[in-house]
Amino acid sequence: MDAKIITSPVRPALISMTAPAAFGMLMTFMFQLIDTYFVGKLGTQELAAMSFSYPVYILVVSFFMGAAAGVSSSVAKVLGEKQWVKAKQLTTLAIVAFVFLTVLLSIIGLLVMDALFFALGVTEVMLPLVKQYMGPLFIGMFALVAGLIGNAALMAKGIMIRSTLVMGIGGIVNVVFDYVLIFGFGPFPAMGLAGAAYATVLSWAVIFLLMMTLLVRESLLSLSFFMDIRQAIKDLRGMLYVAMPAIAAQLLNPVAIAVITRIVSGYGEDAVAAFGIVTRIESLILVGILSLSVVMTPFVAQNFGAKHWHRLDKIVAHAGRLTVYWGIAAFTIVALFPQTIMTLFTQSDAVVAQGVYYFWTVGLSFPMFGLLLITTSFLNGVQSPRTSLKLTIVKSLGLTIPLALLGSYWSLEGTWVGLSIANVIGAWYAYKVLNRWLSEHGSTLPKRSIVNDYKSDLMFWSSGK
């Protein structure tokens, strides 16, 4: 394992780990954003069709991101025990098992696609467009899942830059073939919305091949896979035991997005298109916070295991301030240039107007959203996954959905206000939960003045150091 996690100064170590993770995540979000940009050139109906498919897509991805957390933890543990062969077996087993599960889920998804999207509010007129986009994604989903699991195993070994480069290459492939397959070029016919889906699947295939090659070179994948079935079941149970709370937490967010999409659909296709655009832009602009939350768990876990309590205080303090700064910067950008950002993806005045209002209201709560996110990551790192899951349940089911629904009775703008209020209340609850844990473990951090920490940062920056 990487010794700098428990020895280096906290803030530089956090930043150095977050940077490559942010780049990799940026490439992943670029898949969605590039699709949105080019599909926006096709029209509002196509944008709305893609927005309807987003909750289903993110639901599947979130499930396997939670599974990847379990794989990463299990592989990291045996690597720490210097069981190199075991690490290879676990990684191979995880890829085989979860790819098999993905294929089953994809088949089910293809069979029930009509009923699934009717439940999300898709009309009969729009259903063919939705199926054009989602059909290829279901077929190629196994390649994405294999890449996610493989990347988790590589991160467990401390390999971040090369796996990030793989994601970058996939992003480039997506950029090139998005244009070619959507609008047609040379021997390739224009495929419209379906072309965006095929370009994404092609990029997943490239990531799959490169990631598997990297795993073989790092002795984390066996091409001649064979394990005793009883041992395989035991190992799978071990990984799932760690992963289940993470899977449950990951699933709550897309469930909330699906419900909100259903609420928003009551205001028409323009509203759905706007929601689809802003959620993708939001993911992109908050990539620093999202990647920090990803690296927080292993960073905290190693220091917790080493009983470096003073470093845990520093991690909470530095990660919290980094999150607030990023959230403020992100809000400043979307608040100052909302129309410019929206018109990159659509020329519809109605869609742009709703996107602008979303940025002005929900964007204001970006720092609060980030603080809640890193709190859940911290709790996972200190081996309190159930508390982390409870926090996520309160935020998604107890706040986001009810407040969005309540606001929707007023107007679509009221839905956005409800989402913003949910972030603020959720952050306050996360603050209480975190302080309770810190106090129970003898931390002095809850007694410190937060204002003084921000003053110290301002003095540090003003000094030019």
Image (cartoon, rainbow, N blue to C red):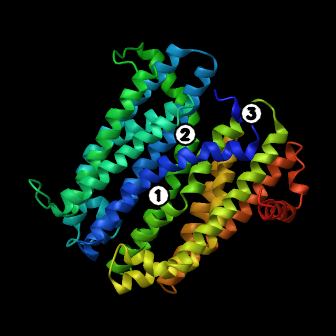
The type of residue carrying mark 1 is Pro
User: Which residue is the site of mark 2?
Assistant: 244
Q: Is residue 240 visible?
A: no
Q: Secondary structure at mark 1?
A: helix
- Closer to viewer: mark 3 or mark 2: 3
- In the rendered structure, find residue 254 and report the number of the disc placed on it: 1
- Residue found 37% across the figure and 74% down from its top: 344
Disc 3 from disc 1: Cα separation: 34 Å
Which residue, as the protein is rendered here, is positioned at the far left? 187
- In the rendered structure, find residue 6 and report the number of the disc placed on it: 3
Quarter of the figure with residue 226 = top left
Q: Position of residue 451 (x, y in %)?
A: 85, 65
Placement of the C terminus among the 4 image quadrants: bottom right
Disc 3 from disc 2: Cα separation: 27 Å
Observer-nearest of 246 and 390: 246
Residue 404, relative to residue 68: is it above or below? Answer: below
Placement of the N terminus among the 4 image quadrants: top right
First in residue order: circle 3 vs circle 2: 3
Say whether marks 1 and 2 touch (CB < 8 Å): no
